[in-house]
Image (cartoon, coloured by chain):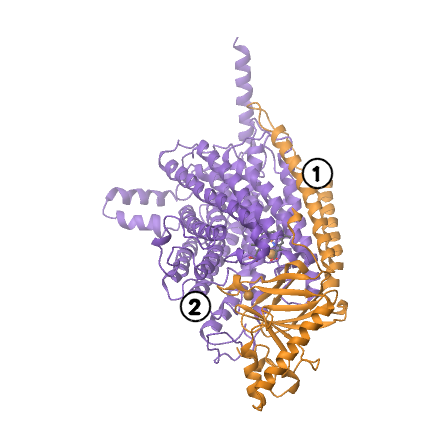
Amino acid sequence: MLDWLPENVSTFGEGVDHLFHVIYYISVAIFILVNVIYVAFIIRYRRKRKGDKAYHYHGYNLLEVSWTALPLALFLFLALYSDRVWQDIRYSEKTPNPDLVVEVMGQQYLWHFRYPGSDGVFGRKHIRFISTTNPFGIDPDDPAGRDDLLTVNSMHIPVNKTVLVRLSSMDVIHSFFLPNMRVKQDAVPGQWIDVWFNSVKTGEYEIACAELCGSGHYLMRAVLDVHSQNEFDQWIDEQHENVRASIAAAGAAPDNATLAAQPDDRQSPTE
Amino acid sequence: MEAAVNTVRHEHGEGHTHSESFIRRYIFSTDHKMIAKQFMITAIIFLFIGGAFALFIRWQLAYPGEPIPVIGTMLPSTWVNADGAVTAEWYTQLLTMHGTIMIFAVIIPLLVGTFGNFAIPLMIGADDMAFPVLNMVSFWLFPLASIIMMAGFFVEGGMAAAGWTGYAPLSVIASLGQTLWIVALFLIGFSSILGAVNYITTVLNMRAPGMKMFDLPMTVWSVFITAIIIIIGTPVLAAALSMLFMDNFLQTSFFMPENLTVTGRDMSRTAGGGQPLLWQHLFWFYSHPAVYIMILPGMGVVSDVLATFSRKPLYGYMAMVFAIIAIAFLGILVWGHHMFQSGMNPLLGTTFMVSTMVIAVPSAIKTFNWLGTMWRGQMEFTTPMLNAVAFVSMFVIGGLSGIFMASTPVDVFIHDTYFIVGHIHYVLFGGSLFAVFAGLYYWFPKMSGRMYNERLGKWHFWMTFITFNGTFFPMHILGVGGMMRRIYDPTVYDFLKPFQPMNEFITINAMILGFVQFILVFNFAYSWFYGKKAKRNPWRANSLEWQAPSPPPHGNFDKEVRVYRGPYEFSSPESVQDYLPQNVSPEELAAQWTRHEQRRAQQKSEP
Ligand code: HEM
Ligand SMILES: [Cu+2]
Ligand SMILES: [Cu+2]
């Protein structure tokens, strides 16, 4: 059954899949064991003759204790065993130092992505500035925010690098789902949530929304492009160039107008 | 009590008071058995409504965008597009209402409302509930709430569309249908609490003389514990719903942060400062215990049915009782397992993973004890028994899939996929609904005074069992493949396209599954009037309900009942036959033996 899993291309995905397999085999074993006994009983202990009495027996305490203790031990083991992987992928103190930080903002029904501009830093942001034309709430007074790179439904990352996604939503709860990376994290309005991954293989992968967010929920699809480092550098330079050009085109216009105008033509340049 | 029975008959005879007595007897009845039937009939109607919704959903998933066959073009234009295909808006309403109806208007009313009402007084030897009028109010709140909820059909924007879980802020920025949903759930919660107070009082105070708590059949124990869970959990739901109502109506912001920005909607009157996750915590604090509200009574019914038809004492009665109590207690500590990916602190993920793993233990204990009950039995495979046997096996699958989801790293992948949908249906259909079927067939003779048709019962069981598995097992595979739940069209995603044949397979099974339920309705409707007359104790069972006439009159018992032993003395060497009812006194038992010896002696003396 587990052959149906989408290809895993993330570093920690192997750990997740390993656990998946362990629990799967244990479950199948328990299922077969219980049902073989069950079916055997059904066949063996069906009434064969009218009037026969069954075995009058109320139970055996030692058996009760053992079939309490054994599952308890097994399930606690599974919990502890799972927790190692869980800590590795989610505990903040175990998060590796990111090579790239991307901010992701959910909106009915699309995903916004934000990269630092050519200055290498994100502009300041505040929830108060969020609007349909400024999805990340970039502070218009911060010059560092002016060249930030924004894309829609299109995410680009380099291969073999730790990517930290900083996730939020501007309207309802969405869920950022990368099947091939074994990543799923809800995007909650009013809250920034970090989640990281590291892809070991280049290629094009799908991003989905996994939390019901309205009738267009199913349309909330984005594409993740995993490039080699060179390709990625090339891509991001190109994008920075475009941003600079559009700022220049806005010319002498005052800062605020530039900022407001920029996310408006937010077609992802690659598409 | 005799007097009450007589009055009813008398009024019938007189003619002119007939209409009034009809209303008192069949509509605003305070008789627990009539109220049980009212719950049953209302819930079965909703089973078909909820089922129809599911079939529309399944049609769309198997054949995205294709017109609904036959009736597609007859449906209103707010539901279907010009071709007669389900629209995305209606789809979202359907999935919301399917979940809400099945949980709040089908499973809970059947297990708690129907069986709780019917079985408790009869099984403890009481003449009615402690508070009969409260009981009537508890029932009538339920159709009232259902009508309010269904009224969403006719208002602008349609029915609620935020899923049965109603996650804020989606449920806040919603249409009037969502508000109706909130009001309806609030009333249903109220109805539950009234019922629960009644059950607890009745079980504690109205047991027949001689009946100790540990003489109670598992059905009564489980409904009793369920009632306690209801009392603990439902007020929290009520609080959460009140806040959601205010967020919807009074522009408060319990669940909304500052400056929520929704395309096409003016949010300027919302101050913000709230927390969307608060809703989830409150909702699941109720709704995880609620999943046990939906399974514990089923486990009780199945325990009784398995013991009766295995002709054996329930294995490990005390362990079974304490397992239920443990489930109820632990059930309050695991709500966070629905929120592993919600953005709550990952440390809490660890905590809730451990508590969730622990709660699987009592379920395992119960399963082993059911096996123990069948061991060296004399099993009789009547329709209730078949359904009970299926329950155990299906519940094992549902419990095991729970373990996958309890493991936080695995849940990262399968959360909000069809794996969850598979899990839900193995516990709620494979579990709860099979238990409902088992209970309905089991008590049908007592309820109606007639036997159902065994052949039709078996057809219904086998068809349901096969198509149930055909429908829901493949959903686990869809989930492993990553198919998100609640999506209108999976073919939007490339990685889901290969699953289309499986989606078609599921839909075909689901349709058959839906239609074979008419066998049940036909069987019951026909047998209710034309079935073979039922004896008092057709299953040769021990608990007290079988000592009352079939159907029991108002006031239940025609003789005084006194309890001398537990409900599971099957095949006891002490008894002449292979069962020994709870109310047979030692003197009567001795007399039975004497008669038995005499008969034996007679047989011997005859050549
Ligand atoms: C062995 C015992 C069980 C375990 C370990 C377990 C575990 C879980 C977990 C971890 C989830 C959350 C999955 C997710 O959303 O990612 C879940 C969901 C659910 N469970 Fe269980 N479960 C068990 C038994 C039951 C039973 C007995 C019922 C009901 C009769 C039930 C009904 C549900 C429902 C309705 C949901 C889905 C709620 C939703 O998101 O719509 N579960 N279960
Ligand atoms: Cu979304
Ligand atoms: Cu739960």
Residues packed near mark 2 inside 10 Å, few (<14), some (14 to 19) or many (20 plus): some
Number of the label disc, if any, that sits on residue B175: 2
In the image, B153: left or right of B216?
left
**Residue B57 seen by the camera:** yes
Q: Residue furthest top?
A: B607
Q: Chain of mark 1?
A: A
Residue matched to label 1: A60
Residue B335: x and y, percent? 62, 60
Q: Which of these two is toward me, B42 or B506?
A: B506
Q: Amino acid at mark 2?
A: Ser
Viewer-nearest of labels 1 and 2?
2
In the image, A75: left or right of A47?
right
Quarter of the view holding residue B86 = bottom left
Q: Name the quarter where the C terminus of chain A is drawn.
A: bottom right
**Residue B295 seen by the camera:** no
Give yes or no for contact between labels 1 and 2 (Cβ–Cβ under 8 Å).
no
**Chain A display color:** orange
Query: Label 1's element?
Result: loop
Q: Which of these two is toward me, A103 or B404?
A: A103
